[in-house]
Image (cartoon, rainbow, N blue to C red):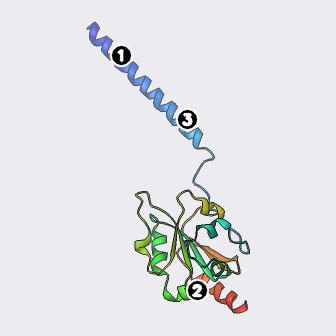
Amino acid sequence: MDVLALCLAAAALLLSMVAVLLAVGVTLRVSHMEGHGAPTPSAGLAVGSEIPRPFVASLPPGSDIEAWLEGPSLIVFAAANCQPCRELMASISDTDLHLFGNRVAIIERPGPDGSPLTDSVRCEADYVTDPDGGLAKAFETNVTPHSFAILGGRIAAQTIGAEVTQLAAIIRTGAATS
């Protein structure tokens, strides 16, 4: 009987130690997370801001940088694992391309498995990867899809989501008055 009682006491002690360790772990995790909730979507560079120089440096060799800066041009931040990004890429039409002077840049964060977004794109675009997030930081964005319309070397409009029709309307108006 003494051996059985000793085993039961040891098991009870072991279970209480595990419970204490779990409670301490949960408490530490909760206290670490306070004030660190999900990131707030950032608004992006303000309309009228100049195009960040890191974007110009990221364009593929042979790109007409002056044409990109003068615009109209479209810059889209997207991610491979983002369903609205895939919908946006599939919805960009030839009309949109023509409106933006066939200058569309997709700044992409690769998916967790390294898969590209290119299988969703139905238009010709310049692809720029942003694995370290430097371009997203330069444009002050942390959400996808986030689109910026460029005109006259500045941001003419921006939108978050899978619609470029708002940007197209602004570009039509801006291009008509320039």
Give the quadrant of the N terminus.
top left
What SS does tag 3 mark?
helix
Which callout, 1 or 2, points to the residue nearer the camera? 2
Residue located farthest toward the front when viewing the structure as drawn: 62
The Cα–Cα distance between marks 1 and 3, rounded to whole angstroms, is 27 Å
Earlier-in-chain disc, 2 versus 3: 3
Earlier-in-chain disc, 1 versus 3: 1
Which callout, 2 or 3, points to the residue nearer the camera? 2
Identify whether 58 is placed above or below 102: above
Residue located farthest toward the top when viewing the structure as drawn: 2
For disc 2, the marked residue is 101
Can you see residue 44? no
Q: Residue at x 42, y 23 (%)?
A: 16
For disc 3, the marked residue is 28
Q: Where residue 24 sits: x, y (%)?
A: 52, 30
Q: Residue at x 42, y 59 (%)?
A: 114
The crowding category of the residue bearing disc 1, from other C-alpha atoms within 10 Å (few below 14, some 14 to 19, many at least 20), is few
For disc 1, the marked residue is 10
What SS does tag 2 mark?
loop
Residue flagged by tag 3: what amino acid is it?
Leu
Residue located farthest toward the left when viewing the structure as drawn: 1
Residue flagged by tag 1: what amino acid is it?
Ala
Can you see residue 89? yes
Q: Where residue 112 sits: x, y (%)?
A: 43, 57
